[in-house]
Image: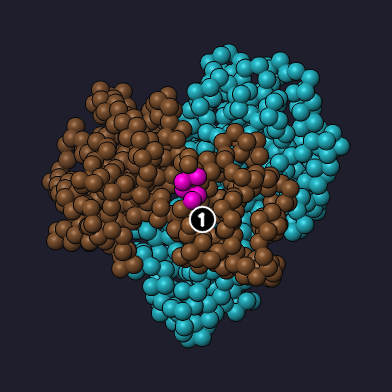
Chain colours: A cyan, B brown
Amino acid sequence: MNLYEKRLSNIYDWMAREGIALVMFEDTEGRRDKTIRWLTGQPGDALLFLSLERKCMLVPWDINLAKVYAAADIILSYGQFDRIPRNAIRKAAERFKIPQGSKIEIPPVTSYPVFLNYVGDLTEFDIICRERSAVSQAQKFRAVKDEEEIKIYRKAAGITNILTELLEKNVRSGKIKTEMDAALFIETEARRRGCEGTGFETLAAGPERSWSIHAFPACTGAAFAGQGLSILDFGLRLAGYTTDVTLTFARDPDAPQEKLLGLTERAYKLALGMAQNGASARNIAAAVDGHFAKSKKAMPHALGHGIGLEEHEDPPLRNREDNTWILEPGMVFTLEPGLYDPVCGGCRLENDILMTETGPEVLTNAGIIRL
Amino acid sequence: MNLYEKRLSNIYDWMAREGIALVMFEDTEGRRDKTIRWLTGQPGDALLFLSLERKCMLVPWDINLAKVYAAADIILSYGQFDRIPRNAIRKAAERFKIPQGSKIEIPPVTSYPVFLNYVGDLTEFDIICRERSAVSQAQKFRAVKDEEEIKIYRKAAGITNILTELLEKNVRSGKIKTEMDAALFIETEARRRGCEGTGFETLAAGPERSWSIHAFPACTGAAFAGQGLSILDFGLRLAGYTTDVTLTFARDPDAPQEKLLGLTERAYKLALGMAQNGASARNIAAAVDGHFAKSKKAMPHALGHGIGLEEHEDPPLRNREDNTWILEPGMVFTLEPGLYDPVCGGCRLENDILMTETGPEVLTNAGIIRL
């Protein structure tokens, strides 16, 4: 069984247990779902149907792209269905001989009005749309990376680490002077070293702008790494998978800035110490929130998140009552404590962690860089 | 009345006509809606509530960012609601004294499972989720740009045109040799000239890869503009608004490649001639599809789309029966006929059109560049 067959097999097994005859996955503008890439190799913009008979049908927007990248039992261009999902559902039901009255599951992100349309249009089937779905099941599988994915992550982290070292060197030497210099350096070097590009828009915020969680605009021509705190948040995408690290450059920090840095570094150590197999993701995030609260500070975002084909995946490391995730071997996630102050600026320290059988392995080497 | 007040006022009027007491807009990962930026200036990641009493409450993820960029009657951090929308809805209902049993409208993209949760949690109100909504109404307003937006578009198009000229010059001189050279040149020059960045990931595909509609990966280190057809699709984002143009570089095209180029150029002229005030967007797209069909070719995507704060807005120029859009003054949209062949490669010609009282004005100067 190849990689895709193995992944599909797990979903087919789930379908059999649930008695679902046909499942639809959708990856389209506004409703992105990288599960289709994970299951077939198709880079994006497609529908994917899985049948209880363990066969799949891919309906790509770009048939030429699918012919090069995708593996599926049947591949039919979306164009032949006038790019209307219900037409593709009908064809899949016909090709897979789905009996009338069978359960057909559509993605849980399907909007309520569109759900009503499906139900109204496809009266011969039982249309199901629910949180606990093949989509959420695939996301659970995807949270635990397989050997092939871990291999990619080691390589992607290696390139990320080279860039981190070069960034520090070039900031120190004065070769990188502006936010834009930093962002373009990353963009160039990532692709030069075999990456598909960056995993998300690089956020480069000099001392005047580091007070926001995510700099807006993402980068400008403003000076970078001058007196105070500068944030550089970037990720490299290799074979679909993105890393995600944040460096904080601190130049001659004053006492309040030192306080933010110290609290953030201690938060990171606290989190890393707690990130063990079997640990509750929520508890780790809660401990960091508590640590900041003791100094009357608050982190305005989650402690971390899984990474993979999407920049934010499971498990969430978030202090919210609905978070029941437990860390386990194969998970790859960020730890990224940060504090932001309208006057002092902000700092964040973010690394990517691979959970192994023996505990957390820090894949990346980001940190607070004192200039 | 300032710009935001004027825009809000139109939505308030609509609410009064519809008898909706409270409307929620949401701009979050997976459910982006630039209407919040259009109504308040907040760059992203927020909830926005509008009340029948013509007051609004913004709930931003990043309160520091909102303080700098956003205008709203009330601004409260999302953190204080544990980042749970229903908590924010309750607070808005309280602050605006919404009577029990009133209609509260949530975004039409709300998923069916989440809609059920809202209904179950907020039993004291009548929760409404429908296609014909404040969100869709705002999108209709946004399809017709106001004077301020047209001013931005003229400026953004001017910068785009300078870049197009420089790109041609640098390709001819050999300064731009690879796909990456082209993409990084655009990234650098856009920001240097005051843009927030690019409006979307630049697609640069040399002759070996131009057969796909959207190149994957978006760009690589491969040679650009060698023998055959190369596609460069990019947009610049200025003050939130993106342009969107595609250049095709043709070097020594063979007969089948010449045929694709000729058909595409004629399709563009046909579309531009038909793009008049009062024209049906669908009819124009259908005419282009018919033009290609006469030569036994098919365009695997729509003819064009509105542009604005989002890279794809209304009106769609698509040949589908549900498309009832009529062109009118103030609309800004692309015309982008293209053909793609696994052997010959692909070509696309895309410009941005402003509809004026007297007809279409072509804002950008992209075209097929013969080397």
Please say whether residue A128 is one of the residues in the magenta stretch: no
Counting from the top left corner in percent of width and height, residue B42 is at 55, 41
Counting from the top left corner in percent of width and height, residue A343 is at 69, 26
Task: Give the camera-side residue of A245 and A51.
Answer: A245
Task: Give the camera-side residue of B298 and B92.
Answer: B92
**Amino acid type shown at disc 1:** Tyr
* Residue at far top of view: A173
- Which of the 4 quarters of the picture holds residue B242? top left
Q: Is residue A61 above or below residue B1?
A: below
Observer able to see residue A58: yes
Circle 1 residues within 10 Å: few <14, some 14–19, many ≥20: many
* Residue at far right of view: A294
Is residue B290 shown left or right of residue A248?
left
Q: Which residues are magenta?
A: B5-9
The residue that appears at 73% across and 48% down in the rendered structure is: B80
The residue that appears at 37% across and 59% down in the rendered structure is: A61
Q: Quadrant of the N terminus of chain A?
A: bottom right
Q: Secondary structure of the magenta portion, mostly?
A: helix
Q: How many marks?
A: 1
Counting from the top left corner in percent of width and height, residue A83 is at 36, 64
Task: Give the camera-side residue of A98 and A74.
Answer: A98
The residue carrying mark 1 is B12
